[in-house]
Image (cartoon, rainbow, N blue to C red):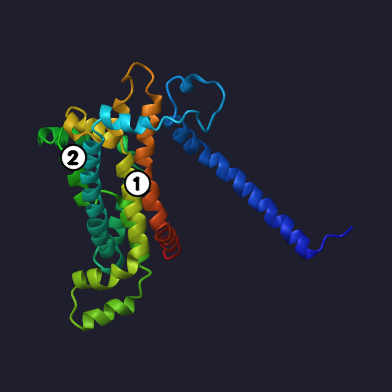
Amino acid sequence: MTISIRQERVIHHGLIYLIVTAGAIVMLFPLLWTVSTSLKTPDQLVYTRIELIPDPIAWENYIKVFEIAPVLRYFRNTMIIVLCAEFGSLVVCSLVAYAFARIPFPGRNLMFVLLLSSMMLPGVVTLIPFFIIFDRLGWINTFLPLIVPRFLAHNPFYIFLMRQFFRGVPQDLSDAARIDGCSEFGIWWRIVMPVSKPVLAAVAIFTFQWIWNDFLYPLVYLGGNKDLWTLALGLNSLKGMEGDVTTHYQMAFSVLMIIPMVIIFAFGQKYFIRGITFSGLKG
């Protein structure tokens, strides 16, 4: 019995879809478990069997979360930090990346290598020196330690990513603009930035994700001022409330935190992938 090329292709595609589907189920199971647990009652949490669709469904867990924690205040505080970080990452880092990519100056390559080498430093290594500096400035328990560094091109990965993309923008466009009298700032704003939407979207999503989920730095700099706590700190504060059984509230809070991230990624997925791809190809 021989198998035709068409049948062989159908079997090949079928195996691929089967493997991809199995991988997707494995990857999505933690999310499904989170959603399921957020809809359970305390009694259902002690079940040993896996029950993805609880009976009854405790929708009131989401209302209870807003009653036991100031979720809206946590959301406001988080958005303040996120918006400032987005401005710093997109505007300041792109200006630095533009200089490295399009403006020749002495020592440019050496400075860029030094910048990249700073990526090798783990964040915890600089945590104590930064804490001492911010403490002496009187910035502890304020938003300033989480906002000001974002305006100082603090993230070399963003600069590297945007520099790689900017180098792929045709130099003739910049030369034509210079002939018309446009300044370097004008070229950055009017020519380079409009054609760099994919990499800007990728950086924006990275920034949102990292700031939105960040727990360590808000804990270190804002831990003593509950009025400035972010969503991540608020989620952690639910531990131990209402006795020892607060898992369902924590999971409901987690689902509320996940929703904005899923929406942003869904709308920016196309630009996100293009930005990563082009930045990697045009070195």
Above or below residue 133? Residue 112 is below
Between discs 1 and 2, the one toward the N terminus: 2
Is 273 left, or right, of 82 in this rendering? right
Where is residue 43? Give x, y as percent. Answer: 45, 19
Tags 1 and 2 touching, CB below 8 Å: no
Q: Residue at x 29, y 26 (%)?
A: 237
Please say if 140 is above or below 152: above
In the picture, the quarter occupied by the C terminus is bottom left
Percent from the top left, x then y, of residue 91? 23, 59
Residue drawn 19% across and 45% down?
147
| Residue 236 drawn above or below residue 123 | above
Mark 1 or 2, closer to the camera: 1
As helix, strand or loop, the secondary structure at mark 2 comes to: helix
Q: Which mark is residue 145?
A: 2
Q: CA distance from mark 1 to mark 2?
A: 24 Å
Q: Position of residue 34 (x, y in %)?
A: 45, 34
Residue 125 in sight here: no
In-image side of 171 versus 178 (left or right): right
- Label 1, residues with CA under 10 Å away: few <14, some 14-19, many ≥20: some
The residue carrying mark 1 is 260
Three-letter code, disc 2: Pro
Mark 2 neighbour class, 10 Å CA radius: few under 14, some 14 to 19, many 20 or more:
many
Kindly state the secondary structure of the residue where label 1 is placed. Answer: helix
User: Which quadrant of the structure image shows residue 220?
Assistant: top left
